[in-house]
Image: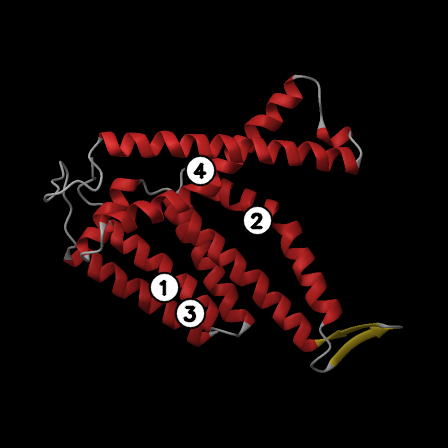
């Protein structure tokens, strides 16, 4: 059931879309940092135990971001030279691009997490408000929840191995890769099997059937949503210009 004072789901989609679009338009690292902080604050308020999940996401994403930054700094030669040691040279443009890449990826991840809390009925409300086909709302909802479901299944399998006395941290790198390969294949197979079950359930519920569909709970795009979007857009523009 929809809360009385809740924003329309389309408002949340537009806010996430605005942040994830602006972060690829803006080039200044300071502006990108403000957009990343804004996306993290928005995602934290959207999720249960938001700040804990935001910091956990940052911690898990940090190694990947550091590897990407390392390759950008080491192999990009354009720009003024900042530091050199033998064949190793670090330029100003390489550092700037690595910072841009890391902040853009973090912003997109936080925006995706803010949308991942939405269920299919909310996506259906959002797209029906702008007369989009119901199939599109289902595909977007399913795609957004696909990666979290895969990671949850993978985490469950890893926990199961630990309960059986098998800790991947104590294995060699070759055996660890082999274990993760088998777990990933098993998780993917389980995900495909669940997708088939979901498809059968949709057919039984009359998905894509002819005739106009009715909804038990309806929510209209109101002046509150317009005001919130204007204020949020103003903050985004102000932050990118002042920085």
Residue assigned mark 2: 58
Q: Whole-Å distance between the Cαs marked 2 and 3?
A: 22 Å
SS for callout 4: loop
- Report the front residue among 68 and 193: 193
Quadrant assignment, res 183:
top right
Mark with earlier residue (2, 1)? 1
Front disc: 2 or 1: 1
Tell me whether circle 1 and circle 4 mark residues in contact (CB < 8 Å).
Answer: no
Q: Position of residue 112 (x, y in %)?
A: 43, 51
Depth check, front residue: 161 or 96: 161
- For image coordinates 25% across by 33% down, the residue present is 203
Disc 3 designates what residue? 239
SS for callout 2: helix
Residue position marked by numbered label 1 in the rendering: 18
For the residues labelled 4 and 2, the Cα–Cα distance comes to 15 Å
Q: CA distance from mark 3 to mark 4?
A: 26 Å
Where is residue 17 shown, x and y percent of the image? 36, 60
Distance from Cα at disc 1 to Cα at disc 4: 24 Å
Left or right? Give the position of 135 relative to 40: left
Closer to the N terminus: mark 1 or mark 4? 1
């Amino acid at each position: 059931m929809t809360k009385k004072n809740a924003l329309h789901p389309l408002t949340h989609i537009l806010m996430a879309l605005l942040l994830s679009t602006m972060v690829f338009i803006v080039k200044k690292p300071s502006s990108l940092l403000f957009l990343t902080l804004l996306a993290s604050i928005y995602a934290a308020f959207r999720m249960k135990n938001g700040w804990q999940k935001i910091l956990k996401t940052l911690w898990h994403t940090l190694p990947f971001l550091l590897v990407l930054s390392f390759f950008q700094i080491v192999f990009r030669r354009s720009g003024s030279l900042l530091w050199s040691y033998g064949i190793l040279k670090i330029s100003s443009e390489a550092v700037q691009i690595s910072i841009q890449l890391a902040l853009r990826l973090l912003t997109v991840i936080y925006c995706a997490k803010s949308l991942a809390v939405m269920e299919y009925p909310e996506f259906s409300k959002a797209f029906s408000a702008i007369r989009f086909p119901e199939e599109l709302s289902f595909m977007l909802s399913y795609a957004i929840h696909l990666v979290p479901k895969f990671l949850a299944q993978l985490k469950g399998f890893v926990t199961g191995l630990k309960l059986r006395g098998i800790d991947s941290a104590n294995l060699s790198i070759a055996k660890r890769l082999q274990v993760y390969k088998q777990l990933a294949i098993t998780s993917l197979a389980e995900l495909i099997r669940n997708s088939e079950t979901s498809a059968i359930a949709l057919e039984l519920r009359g998905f894509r059937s002819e005739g106009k569909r009715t909804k038990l709970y309806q929510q209209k795009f109101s002046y509150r949503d317009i005001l919130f979007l204007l204020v949020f857009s103003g903050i985004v523009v102000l932050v990118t210009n002042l920085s």
